[in-house]
Amino acid sequence: MTVVVTPYVFQRGGPLLVDEIRDRRPEIDLEHADEDDVLEAVVDAEIVVTGRLPEDVLDAAENLRWVQAISAGTDAYDHDALTDRDVALTTVSGIHARPIGQQVMGYLLHFERRFDRAIAQQRDRTWKRYTGGELGDRTVGIVGVGAIGSQIADYCTAFDARVVGTKRDPTDAPAAVDAVYGPDGLETVLAESDYLVLACPLTEETRGLIDADALATLSDDAVLVNVARGEVVDQSALVDALEADDLGGAALDVFEEEPLPEASPLWDRDDVLVTPHMAGSTPHYWERCADVFVRNYDRFRGGEDLENRVI
């Protein structure tokens, strides 16, 4: 059973991922392809491990049966083409929960303890004491209480914050969430949130979900946190809300266009914290990817249901 790791692994992590898989299962017939030979390499591959799957690579992989994505989202994959060919698609959903959860807590503390003001005062060499807030006085709303959202909720309990959220199946919510609603309860979550955290996948239902109307439902001092996908938010409406002082601020790790264009007004705002789509980064990324792959490899060989299967 031939496994090919494509060159389409972000941050040139292919060799690291290959090493981690080989450390766990040296007997796997594993090949790491480069840009020049990937089309030839995938011809006989039954399994492909990749960060994306260009059309020409999919076409060349005539014997393909399973694609292991090294991301949680799969909006970059052609679901229809994979479905038509009866090719399974799985993700590494769950391995991002700890780093993204910690990143979100950093965002919340940045605004609650007013580090934005500290940075501005330091820049101006100004010594002026001010009062920080406490997360225990706040309600954190989470749109998408999945693996990442659940981890964020767990971390919030350490600060005594109230947590509300939306989940596709609200009957399966973790105990750390004080109130959970189905997707139709979004307006309630918006109205109650001091911090609104977006942790949902990008789908046709969530694209543009946080539009001008949704932003207007938030309180004027609420802070928007996006660690989902940039397209979940209407970015121009967000800029308008910030410029009108209809929002307390935003912490953004993802954007409609990446890299964020130099001309974007989001760069220059003191009430916006911009990070370069790195919330899921961790020194343990490749070992955790390898763990998910090896578990799924055993399931695949045994004819069992695959973990994190999307298709």
Image (cartoon, helix red, strand yellow):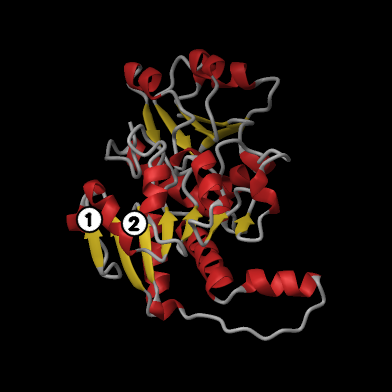
Q: Is residue 164 visible?
A: yes
Q: Considering only vertical position in the picture, is 223 above or below 137?
A: above
Label 2 SS: helix
Most extreme residue toward the front, as rendered? Answer: 244
Q: Image point 68% across, 27% down: which residue?
A: 34
Out of 81 and 155, give the one closest to the viewer: 155
Residue 260 image offset from top left, x and y in percent: 66, 41
Q: Considering only vertical position in the picture, is 307 above or below 68?
A: below
Q: Which residue is mark 1?
A: 181
Left-right relation of 304 to 290: left
Q: Residues within 10 Å of mark 1 (few under 14, many from 20)?
A: many
Q: Is residue 159 visible?
A: no
Out of 128 and 235, give the one closest to the viewer: 128
Which of the two labelled residues, at mark 1 and mark 2, occupies the earlier sequence position? 1
Q: Image point 35% across, 53% down: which residue?
A: 217
The part of the image, by quadrant, that contains residue 89 is top left
Q: Image point 17% across, 56% down: which residue?
A: 171
Q: Which residue is mark 2?
A: 190
Residue 167 image offset from top left, x and y in percent: 27, 52
Most extreme residue toward the right, as rendered? Answer: 125
Q: Image point 40% across, 61% down: which residue?
A: 219
Q: Amino acid at mark 2?
A: Leu
Out of 282 and 18, give the one closest to the viewer: 282
Q: Amino acid at mark 1?
A: Tyr
Left-right relation of 36 to 206: right
